[in-house]
Image (spheres, helix red, strand yellow):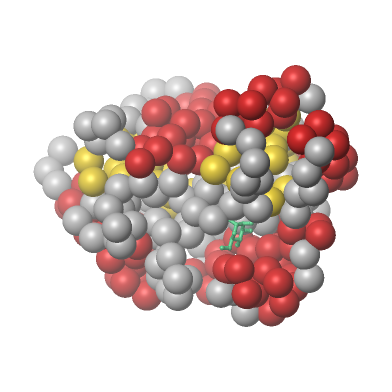
Amino acid sequence: LIIFTDLDGTLIDSDTYSYQNAIPVLNTLKNNQVPVIPVTSKTRLEVETLRQSLQINDPFIVENGSGIFVPLDYNDLTLPKSNQWGDYYLHRLGCTYAEARQGLEKIATALNEPLQGFGDMSEAEICHLTGLSSDEAKQAKAREFTEPFLTPKKVTPERLNKIVQDLGYRIVVGDRFCHLIGAGAGKGKAVQWLVDSYQSARPDAKITTLGLGNSPNDLEMLEVVDSPVIVPGNKGINPGLSGKGWQVAPAPGSQGWAEAVRGVVLSPP
Ligand code: 2M8
């Protein structure tokens, strides 16, 4: 079993960013050597901080499936040495941050409307919009691949998507922000790449996957896992994920995450 999980609003509570309710289940998973792979809009720096406090050493997927980081000392996967990047192997599916910033400028020109991305905001503004602390906002601003931006008001999603596609990018929608990502990126593609890598490292093993998410940007990830679970928000399921007939966790955030995962891990094979 491999668990692929979104963070904000899924493993982590929406407003308080707390994952206390999930700690006992995370410890059980660690004892049973079940990999828990974050698949998030967050940056590498944000995920590194979380991995340090949770003491997990599994691979992780950042910035909406733009970068897959596998620790060099992770023995369950062997990846080409040529992709070494600091303490990791990096498999990049998206664009660079510089390209994302250029893309946002081109979209703003096409719309004739200024767009506000994280690169245009101060740390204080990001804290105000998200409830992150200023250290956390600094890490959220340290982007390597993608640009979160405020949803433009005067354009339909269809027209916006058309402009973005013609420029060679994609937009995915998170809890609070739109995210401009490279055309080749996405949570689904990144998860599939990691599953294939695990499978080719252990051709005889039958790998099963559980995925958990709460926002429209999680849809593609939930579509490629064996068991998709939607974690509801305080007002129920996000409309972008409704009508799929997938399992819904019994509560929002870390509490629902823990109960849903406990159900799967403790259920007889
Ligand atoms: C952004 O991501 C969330 C996740 O869904 C969003 O779109 O609302 C990211 O930029 C991330 O880096 C940051 O930590 C988060 C804070 O709420 O916002």
Which percent across, then down, holds residue 69? 66, 46
| Quadrant location, the C terminus | top left
Q: Left or right: where does residue 149 sit relative to residue 16?
A: right
* Residue drawn at 80 percent across, 48 percent down: 114
In this rendered view, identify the residue nearer to me: 121 or 50. 121
Which percent across, then down, holds residue 113? 78, 44
| Quadrant location, the N terminus | top left
Residue 70 seen in this snapshot: no
* Residue drawn at 77 percent across, 64 percent down: 121
Q: Left or right: where does residue 239 sit relative to residue 36?
A: left
* Residue drawn at 56 percent across, 64 percent down: 51
In this rendered view, identify the residue nearer to me: 184 or 202. 184
Q: Residue furthest left?
A: 268
Q: Is residue 153 above or below residue 143?
A: above
* Residue drawn at 58 percent across, 26 percent down: 158
Q: Which quadrant does ligand 1 occupy?
A: bottom right
In this rendered view, identify the residue nearer to me: 199 or 94. 94
Which percent across, then down, holds residue 240? 40, 38
Which percent across, then down, holds residue 82? 82, 34
Residue 266 seen in this snapshot: yes
Q: Is residue 113 above or below residue 183?
A: below
- Residue 110 location, quadrant: top right
In this rendered view, identify the residue nearer to me: 98 or 51. 98
Q: Is residue 141 above or below residue 94?
A: below
* Figure label count: 0
Q: Is residue 41 above or below residue 241?
A: below
